[in-house]
Image (tube, grey):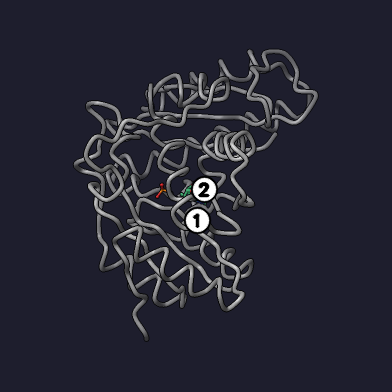
Amino acid sequence: MTKTPIVRTVAALRKKVGAWRKEGKSVALVPTMGSLHEGHLSLVKLARKKADKVIVSIFVNPTQFGAGEDFTTYPRDEKADRDKLSALSIHLIFAPKVTEMYGHGFSSEVSVHGLTEVLCGASRPGHFDGVATVVTKLLLQAAPDIAIFGEKDYQQLLVIRRFVQDLNIPVKIAGGAIVREADGLAMSSRNAYLNSKQRATAPLLNKEMKSAAKKLKVGETSKTVLSQASKNLEKAGFRLDYLEVRHAQTLEAIEGKVTGPARLFAAAFLGKTRLIDNIRI
Ligand code: AMP
């Protein structure tokens, strides 16, 4: 198996992409923070279908972690990641150091209003500014035709679509469906933090969300359904950050019956581990 080459500087990345462009090749980018699982790899496989050349970036972005969050302990395993990507025959890994991304005197930010003020944006102040800024940089650095993001981070996907449109960044944004463990738990690098008892409890989040979504679909009001689901989850040992029904595009709150495109969004702690999930209603 040929090992996928790794570049660590923007200059080396641009050189590679420039050479592909000269050959008339199309380019896809899949941004990640590494510690790759089948969820990430599904996006990589999608990218392989959509473009001639696929770049995966691996960068644990410090600016999207709040004070007291898990930036220092976030799982990192570049060797294992490279093996997984090599097996999929992708063309390039971009794994810059923090100093390459945020040079001396760095003082700019991309900030999206509205969409970032609810859900994870409300509980993690500054998180989406960090995400929007780093994704803007990656899009300008790699200049791909298409960039692919997972619906696991549905709010993030909407935020990215928003600033790409607002800032006229010439790239197509595609979303990939959530990949789950057999028991329904959405795959996440952070699942590695769960102890065995928490791991056994974790799938109840998706199970409860599915059952709530069913009730919402048949016209029960969101207030009643969510209050029951919250009680069940708290009884099972979750500490809820939020459990909300929102419009699938604008993220406006829906408190009565669901009549248009809507999603159910949840963030919940098991111990110190924060799990997120969302499903279409
Ligand atoms: P991360 O490494 O957590 O920043 O995720 C990198 C990309 O993979 C993001 O676009 C995520 O939405 C996506 N992703 C993470 N987990 C999953 C999953 N279980 N299914 C689909 N996409 C995912």
Q: Nearer the viewer, residue 56 or 25?
A: 25
Q: Is residue 223 above or below residue 204?
A: above
The residue pinned by badge 2 equals 184
The residue pinned by badge 1 equals 182
Q: Give the structural element (helix, strand or loop) at label 1.
A: loop
Q: Name the quadrant containing residue 225.
A: top right
Q: Are marks 1 and 2 in contact (CB under 8 Å)?
A: yes
Q: Give the structural element (helix, strand or loop) at label 2.
A: loop
Residue 63: x percent and y percent? Answer: 31, 35
Q: Amino acid at mark 2?
A: Gly
Q: Is residue 71 above or below residue 47?
A: above
Q: Nearer the viewer, residue 15 or 62?
A: 15
Q: Is residue 63 above or below residue 250?
A: below
- Identity of the residue drawn at 47% across and 27% down: 111
Q: In the visual, does 269 lie left or right of 116?
A: left
Residue 117 disc label:
none
Q: Is residue 34 above or below residue 66?
A: below
Residue 55: x percent and y percent? Answer: 46, 65
Q: Name the quadrant containing residue 155.
A: top right
Residue 156: x percent and y percent? Answer: 52, 37
| Label 1 Cα crowd, 10 Å radius (few <14 / some 14-19 / many 20+) | few
Residue 279: x percent and y percent? Answer: 61, 38
- Identity of the residue drawn at 48% across and 35% down: 205
- Identity of the residue drawn at 33% across and 51% down: 59
Q: In the visual, does 271 lie left or right of 125?
A: left
Gap between marks 1 and 2 measured at Cα: 6 Å
Q: Amino acid at mark 1?
A: Ala
Looking at the image, the residue that sits furthest to the bottom is 1
Looking at the image, the residue that sits furthest to the left is 72
Q: Quadrant of the C terminus?
A: top right
